[in-house]
Amino acid sequence: MLLWIRTQDKKSLLNVKEVTVDKKKITGVVGTASLDDWSKVIGKYDSEKRALEILDEMFTKLAEHTDTAVTFTMPEE
């Protein structure tokens, strides 16, 4: 399944392979080369708790769909 994410600043649409929370930031891995991952911050939030809530929203959306591609827009706050 493909996950397309529109970044928080609305300036990029990325096909991500992995999404991680690092404190207040949410990062999407968009590519790999050899042993290196190429990633981009797709959102920054007021707290790690809020970032984890958004990750839960992504998970729920993925779990609810059986399509070959799912889209998700990062919330502004």
Image (cartoon, rainbow, N blue to C red):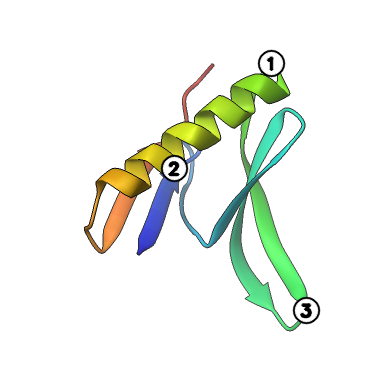
- Residue ranking furthest to the left: 67
Percent from the top left, x then y, of residue 52? 61, 30
Q: Is residue 70 above or below residue 44?
A: below
Amino acid type at image mark 3 = Leu
Residue that appears at 54% across and 26% down:
53
Residue at mark 1 to residue at mark 2: CA–CA distance: 20 Å
Which quadrant: the C terminus? top right
Percent from the top left, x then y, of residue 1? 35, 64
Percent from the top left, x then y, of residue 27? 65, 45
The numbered disc on residue 35 is 3
Residue that appears at 66% across and 21% down:
49
Determine the secondary structure under disc 3.
Answer: loop
Would residue 71 be found to the left or right of residue 48 on screen?
left
Residue that appears at 77% across and 79% down:
35
| Marked residue nearer the N-terminal end (3 or 1) | 3
Q: Is residue 43 above or below residue 41?
A: above
Circle 3 Cα neighbour tier, 10 Å, few/some/many (<14 / 14–19 / ≥20) = few
The numbered disc on residue 46 is 1
Q: Which residue is mark 2?
A: 59
Determine the secondary structure under disc 1.
Answer: loop
Amino acid type at image mark 1 = Asp
